Image: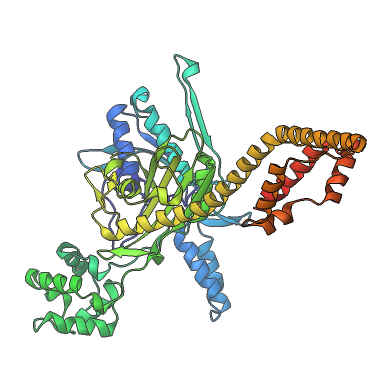
Amino acid sequence: NGCGMAHGAIPDLLGRVLSGSKYGVRQTRGKFGLGAKMALIWSKKSTGVPIRIKTSHVSADANKRKKKKRKSDSDDDDDDEEEEDDVGKNNEIVGGRKVGKIISTCVLDIDIYKNQPRVIQHTQEPNTEQWIGTEIQVLVAGNWTTYKSRVVQYLRQLAIITPYARLEMTYSNRSDEKKGMNFKFERRSEQMPPAAREVKHHPSSVNNLLVQQLLERTNAKTLVKFLTNDLSGITPASARRLIERLGNSFEPDMDPADLDDKLVTRFVQVLRSADDLFKSPDGGCLSPLGEYNLNLGIQKVVEPDIIATARDKPGAYDGHPFIVEAAVSLGGKDAKEGITVVRFANRIPLLFEGGADVATRVANGKIKWSSYKIDHKRDKIGVFVSIVSTKVPFKGTGKEYIGDDIIEIQQSVKRALQNCCQQLRAHLTKKNALRDVKERKSRLLKYIPDVSRSVFGILEAMQKRKSEEAESGPRYSSPRKRIAGAGAGAGVGSSRQQHLKPTESEVFSVLERVSNGDLTEDTIKEHLVEAVEENVNAG
């Protein structure tokens, strides 16, 4: 359940708004960076009750040092012992997993006016349970009747995008126990996505304010060092070529601190236009859910009849990498006719303003569903789109939808959905072919009893006439019938008619079997059923 929080950092992490600072960019799950802090503020505003935090911290730095120690083959024994002591200072290995040695408990309030945490209780105790993660208890007031459906919808979509997590929600109604609710989504996958990596800013993504902040923080003494160390994708050679384009006011060995506002503006303009000097950002730093997990999540919650998933190749816009994953399902529990779009941004469900989102507009306007043998009005179609990026291009103050004005993302969503539809078309084509065979077979079998009865009646009449001819002599047909028979034999296709016409011996054999009782209506029916089975299954 996560790596937990360090004991001393808990008050600032949850009790001080905008306490963090970024020296790079990274895919984050939040939209504002205020989630847990806003829960504390809302609790204070609605009930006045402080929050309680229980956490056991697993040091990520210690984990990194341990990995480095394992990879190193040149360290001596003394260094190894010191490294092992550092790793085991706050963490230990229990049952093959690393756990914190202590559990921190903190009861916390916030001073809204001073933007400071007010610590009511902050204690430590030994972690005898080998428990890891973070548990937060918060008491808030709200209108459950009005927003129940949204809460349930959010949990269902969260279960889709986090199939590796176990989610449970219990609602108890003190006045009427029958109105109580319990939702539980068990873990479906053991594969967690890799953690997103923080990377330096790409030259195409910078602006004046960001460059000024980087210049204030940098330790570089020359402009070349600043370009290569504080930005991504720039080599020393490309940095020197870039400085040549900047003009005479810039020198490779000049101090970055000497750049004034005018030079910074020129610097940013050239950086954003010099795409030929550095590589586009790749998606290696991102953490998409993965097609396997997306498939399992949808199966767990929606239970569709059929599902197809796809991931488009990594793309970039304005210096920020992104990856689009998509799934299309047909049928499912509680599914509605038509297209239902479910959207995720950095693995967070988006519930509101879906009509303006890029996923909804592509699904409704850019995909020709009929060409994939899907009826977008009558079939129950589920469209799931997950976009991860170091900077999700939200629109609006609520950050609830992604606009379709960024062509790179729009085209990536379209390609991913088309890939899913192509997979479904192959399956539906095969399914429809099998359905047609089944229907044709059903229609043929439906008429077999009537055909068997008619054929056997004709054979009985022929056998009766044959018996009468044997007793009273042969009957001669009229001259008109003999002439018509001769003319038919001389026409087009006479050879085919002669081939299909049975011989006298074959007719005699069949009538003999009818006379002996070997050929009955039931035997004709059995032969017809066998013929239908053989020919229909053969295609």
> Residue 216's spot in the image, x, y percent?
19, 67
Q: Is residue 222 above or below residue 165?
A: below
Q: Is residue 467 above or below residue 282?
A: above
> Residue 428's spot in the image, x, y percent?
52, 49
> Residue 53's spot in the image, x, y percent?
42, 40
Outermost residue toward the left in this view:
262
- Residue 14 is drawn in which quadrant? top left
Q: Nearer the viewer, residue 33 or 279?
A: 279
Q: Note whether residue 479 is visible.
A: yes
- Residue 526 is drawn in which quadrant? top right
Q: Give left or right: position of 84 versus 402.
A: right
User: What's the residue at 57%, 51% (across, down)?
Assistant: 430
Q: Nearer the viewer, residue 254 or 411?
A: 411
User: What's the residue at 14%, 71% (across, down)?
Assistant: 269
User: What's the residue at 47%, 59% (across, down)?
Assistant: 194
Q: Give left or right: position of 220 versus 66.
A: left
Q: Nearer the viewer, residue 335 or 95?
A: 335
- Residue 186 is drawn in which quadrant? top right
Q: Nearer the viewer, residue 344 or 31?
A: 344
Q: Give left or right: position of 531 versus 345.
A: right
Q: Give left or right: position of 277 versus 375.
A: left
Outermost residue toward the front in this view:
479
> Residue 403's spot in the image, x, y percent?
25, 50
